[in-house]
Amino acid sequence: MSILEYIEQLSQDKLLYFALPVFFVSMFVEFKVAKEKYHSKDTGVSLLMMVFSAIVEFIPKVLAFFVFFYLYQISPLNGVVNRQWWAWLLLFFADDFSYYWFHRLNHEVRLFWAGHVPHHSSVHMNLGTALRQGVGERIHKFFFWLWIPLLGFDPLMMFTMMGVSLIYQFFVHTELVDKLPKPIEFIFNTPSHHRVHHASNIRYLDCNHAGILIIWDRMFGTFSEELKEIDHPVYGLTVNIETYNPVTVATHEYTAIWKDVKRADKWSDKLNYIFNSPGWSHDGEDKRAKVLRKKLKEQENVRH
């Protein structure tokens, strides 16, 4: 197919039209069941973040589509991998693997974290929080998928699978579902696993980056079990911004980076404030998640 034929097919994609009504109906049902999980101003900010992220993503998404198409065209597997059932299965794993690393590095590289942090800025865990998307992360997101069209997967398949993943992830943002049967908890990202991801407790920081499959976190050492009995998840940031101003929610970490860069004298320190993990400091306590978790583990070992 030509690029114009792909664009025509993309314009006929109804996945978003199906998903949005389902999202809002699900939020309404959750609200009716558990009103205490919602706060009107907080939910309003979440909806604004959804709109902001969609606007910011438009140009990067269009550019990504053309780049994906070009890479697909030059792939030696172009025409070999079509839309067979096994191709969709392989793409499912490839897409989820890409999402894991995209999401993980959004937590481990401060510049990326600045674009992702709006999603974690709510102190509430509900389906509305799922719509509070990171704004700045839309700019660099698609780089993590560039390798997939080289394997012969066409861009329409890729965008469809990315959409399926986002729809799945919407439903893990809830406190109304407790732990599921152990085989499901072992393989899939679940509400229990994702509550950990949104928690600001030291034990849970920068864990469970999964999209659909939690196996990546288990494989790469970023998995943490939800232990509500001894450490109930507390949502939000380690230092909450306490504002409902949508512009501040979207940009506050970029401002914080700029302030840190200005007060550092050495270029190496300036670069660390941009590319090292959040919490790194050249003149204060190291509050990176891995450092804090290590200290907590040492303290627990001493107590026992």
Image (cartoon, rainbow, N blue to C red):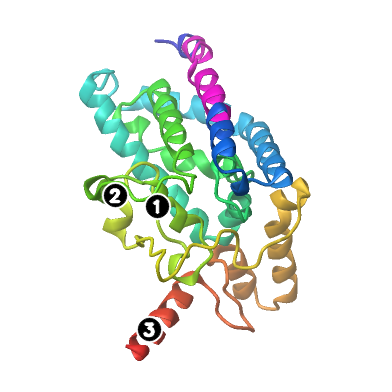
Q: Nearer the viewer, residue 164 or 178?
A: 178
Q: Using a 10 Å C-alpha cutoff, classify the residue at mark 3 as few (fewer than 14 neighbours), some (14 to 19) or many (20 or more).
A: few
Q: Nearer the viewer, residue 257 or 126?
A: 126
**What's the residue type where badge 2 is placed?**
Glu
Q: Is residue 85 above or below residue 142?
A: above
| Residue 61 locus on image (x, y percent) | 56, 30
| Quadrant in the rendering for residue 208 | bottom left
Q: Which residue in the structure is indicated by mark 2?
A: 185
Cα separation, mark 1 vs mark 3, equals 23 Å
| Quadrant in the rendering for residue 156 | top left
Q: Which residue in the structure is indicated by mark 3?
A: 300
Q: Is residue 137 shown to the viewer in this render?
A: yes
Q: Residue at 46% of width from left, 35% of height from top? A: 166
Q: Residue at 33% of width from left, 26% of height from top? A: 153
**What's the residue type where badge 3 is placed?**
Glu
**Are circles 1 and 2 on residues that touch, CB within 8 Å?**
yes
